Every structure is written in structure tokens, then in C-alpha cells.
Amino acid sequence: MLANTFVYGFVNSIILVLVALGFNLTFGISGVANFAYGALYILGALLSWVFFNTIGLPYLLSVLCAVVLTAVAGELMYRFVLLRIRGMVLSEVIATFGIGLATLELFKYLGFIGFEYSLPVFVDTSIEIGQVVVDMQRVFIVIIGIAMAGFLWFFTHHTRTGLRFRGIAQEERTALSLGINSDRVAMLSVSFGAAYAAIAAIVILPLGTINVEQGYSVLIKALAVCIVGGLGSTGGLVLASFLIGYGQTITVTYLESHWVMLVPLIAILGILIFRPSGLFGEQKELEERI
Amino acid sequence: MLEVKNLMVFFENALALNDFSMTVNEGEIVGVIGSNSAGKTTLMNTISGLIIDMKIKEKRKGGERITIYGEILFQGEDITETQPFDRVKKGLVLSRERHPVFPESDVAENLRIAGHQVKKLALSERMEYVYALFPALSDLKRRKAGFLSGGEQQMLAIGMALILKPALLLLDEPLLGLSPMMQTMLVDAVKNLRKESGITILITEQFARPILPFIERGYVIENGMLALSGTGEELMDNPEVKSAYFGI
């Protein structure tokens, strides 16, 4: 039981990391709280389903197309909607939430409901870790989750575009005066976030079916992790994912499973009461000093 | 090299710059002296293009109306409507007022962000150059910029502009908020920079005393208008400048 909790809690935590990375990336760089994140997540999954099942492309190719198209969707959303309201937080939230709501409801209207809408697992076997049996998909989730977090770190610290990201994230006008095009970088950050959402969906959703309602719960999970970790902080994101992830798994194992949804909400409430800037609110620390 | 012709900048109906004209020739070091709210920073932001960016962004969301009249010519080219990042490509780089660096990045990373479009080899060379110009920074490479002192941040801010190897360096109030000792150090560094690289510099300041001795020409700006202009020495001997800036 204990070993089970440990292994599945770990997987659950990595799922949260995967889900929150894209949201955190976009918010951390352009300051846009992308509430259409859940819709992009479902869009990525459905696109890959359509490419694979309806059009009949090979699996890898359909995944690639889905990720690219989701990124393009993010880019279009920035170009035609967010561009005009960037910097006005409330308008951003309302606009992106509206887009997300419309998209998800449209999917429902189009009839993307049911058991046939599920993505294939990568490899259909399972392995044993200690005495715990884990299916290969969960192992892939862990590997890909860690790889994606590592790639994000490498990208933002060691590539030119990544350095531009960090510049805009910290001092937009200084970055501008150093020749960084803030609009382009912000657009890239939204479309990168969208691509991360699509990848997360394609890796995670084979565990169940593509359920449009998940668009909402994914958004809540991402929000919870980012708020608890401290918005924009990647270290905080990982720590918060593990806190909430293990919290959920322990709740399922030792309490009752229908209480799971409460864990992220309680975590948000708790952190807002005791440490409003989040666990790793670095910016806050610096601001207070100055 | 730089020519500003009859520049007028309005924020809504407030006039920040009024019919301001000035020139900077290649290889010169030119100062713009003025008190608080005289329009120095607006001038610098207009020359560097930050105002254009602000204007576009405000217009998009229906915010403050910013109007710019007049012309800015850089190396013979009209750049009045050019975006700031395109001006940087042309060699016009601003080091902003109050040295806003990237607080969560360490010193080396600040310089690397500034050099986001510089080739790797050239970048490390220029970083060494900045460390040589400001030896204080080379001991702080791994320190987060937010934890540096004001003077160190100012050095870093100038260093970041230098990474881009500007043809014309704009320094907006580099001495603001620094101790007299730090001011002297910075002025020495700027003098060295000029001696070694022959770079063209436009500098704004409210502290006339440390600046006037080494600028070639200067403009005095008051309420957004040009009040006086002349060589550094002429300005130093001018009775009005003396009474306003030296308290004599």
C-alpha cells in the first residue's frame, strides 16, 4: 500500500507538472494568464485523434501535426485578441476564459463525447517497480514530464529565444531598449504554452478518454499548482505539483476518492491565507528588499 | 549622426517636449542638462523609440493618446516612426533611467540577455570588455542583479548597452541616486570608454557639475524647451547655468 502510494503519487505529481508547465510558461513570460489553457489541452488531444483516426496519418506524424496546430491556435489567439488587451489583467482573464469556454462547448456541440474518443497508449505493457505494477504509459509520463521540464530550463537559460523570454519576463521596457521585440516574444510564449498543453494532453490522456470536461479540471489543476508554487516560478511549480500530487494520491488511498478535487482548492486557499505570493515567490522577495 | 528637428511630444494634452531641436555629430559626447520633469527622459525615450512602442500599445487598448510631431534623423535616415528594436539594429542603444536591469538574472546572464542577437564568440569578447571597463562587476558575475547596489546596477546597465556595440549610446541620468564617489567612478569609466572606443555618447543629467567638464557640447532643457546650448566650457561659464546648477 505504501509503495503503491509512493509510486502512483509520483506519477500523479509529474502529471501535474506537465499540466502546469505551459500555463506557467505563458504567464511567467508575457504576464498573460491563459484561461483558455484547458481548451488548448483538449484541442491538442482532439486534433491528434482526428489526424490519427479520421485522416489516418501515422501516429507520430499526427501527434506532431496536432502539437504544431495547437501552437498556431495559441499564436492566432494572441495576434487577434490578446495583442490589444495585453497588460490589462482582468480583460485578459475574461477574454481567454471566454475563448476557452466557447471552444470547449463547441467541442461538445460537435459531438466529441464518448468512449471512442481516446488516444492510444504508446506501448501496451506494464513493468514492476519494487512490488508495484505500473503500466508503461505512466512510465512514459514520468520520462516525458521530466524531459519537458528539463528542456524548458535549458531553453530559457541557454538559447537566444529563451534569453529573450527571460528578458521580457523581468523588465519589458529594458528588454525593448536592448532590441527585443516584446510583441513577438509574448506571442511565442503563448504559442509555446499551447504546444506544451497539447503535448501534455497527448501524453496524459491515453490513461482515459478525451473528455471535454477535463478542459475545466485541467485549468483548475494548472492554476492551483501555479498559485501554490508562486506564479511564474518553475521551482515552485515542481514543489507545488509534488505537494498537491501526493496530497491527491493520499486522499484517494486513505480517504475517499470523491474528495480528490478538493485537494487543489484547499491548497489554493491555504497558500493564499498563509503565504499569498506562493511558496517560491521570488519576485516578491526582491521587491521587498528594494 | 543624430538630428532632432522641432520635436514635440504630447501625452494627451500635456506637452512634454516643445519644439526641441538638437544634433549629435559622430564621435562627440553631448550632454542634455535639465532639472526633474524638464523632459530629459521623454527626449531619450523618443530618440530610442520607447515612446513609439508606448504609443502603439496605448492606441491598441484605447489608453493614453500620445502624439509626436517633428523629425528624428539617425545617420541621415528618418527614424521617427521606427520601432525600438529596429533602432537598436541601426546602432542606437539606450541605457534607461534608474538602471532597471533584470533583477532575477545574475550579472553574466543580464549581459547575455542584452547580447541576445550577438554571435557567441563576439559576445564573450564583449563581456570581457565590459568586465575590464567595470572591474567591480567581474567579481559579481554570479550575483543576482536585484541584489546589487545602485552603482553596480548602473554599471551593469551601461555594460548591457555596450554589449550591443552601439554607434550612438544614450545614457539617461546615469548618475541618479549614486554617491559622489560612485559618480566619480562612473564618470571616469565613461571617459575611458570614450577614449578607447571613440563611441558617440548622448548623456542626460541633472547633476551638471560632474558632466559639464567632459562633454563637448551641451543643451540645457527647461519645461520641455531648449533654454541654452553651447560647448561644455561655455555652459560652465554661463551665469544662468552657474546659478541654477552650481548654486553660485
Image: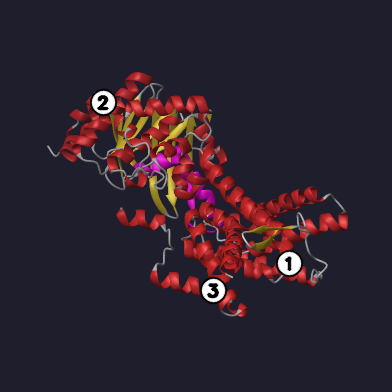
Spatial distance from mark 3 to mark 2, Cα to Cα?
65 Å
Q: Residue at x 27, y 38 (%)?
A: B175
In percent of width and height, residue B80 lies at 51, 38
The chain containing the residue under callout 2 comes to: B
Image point (32%, 46%), residue name: B147
**Mark 1–mark 2 distance (CA, rounded to whole Å):** 73 Å
Q: CA distance from mark 3 to mark 1?
A: 21 Å
State how many labels appear.
3
Task: Depth check: give the residue in front, B33 or A251.
Answer: A251
Quarter of the image where one finds residue A81: bottom right
Tag 3 secondary structure: helix
Q: Which residues are magenta?
A: B40-69
Height in image: B192 above or below B211? above
Q: Nearer the viewer, mark 3 or mark 2?
A: 3
Quarter-wise, where is residue A202 in the image?
bottom right
Badge 3: residue crowd in 10 Å (few <14, some 14–19, many ≥20): many
Are the residues flagged by discs 1 and 2 from a single subunit?
no
Query: Residue B40's spot in the image, x, y percent?
Result: 34, 41
Residue A232, percent from left and from top: 49, 56
For the residue marked with disc 1, what is the amino acid?
A: Gly
Q: Is residue A95 left or right of residue B144?
A: right
- Against B164, residue A29 (above or below) is below
Residue A93 on the magenta span: no
Farthest front residue in view: A131
| Amino acid at the residue labelled 2 | Phe
Which of disc 1 and disc 3 is earlier in sequence? 1
Residue that numbered label 1 is attached to: A208
Relative height, residue A93 to residue B126 (above, below): below
The residue under label 3 is A263
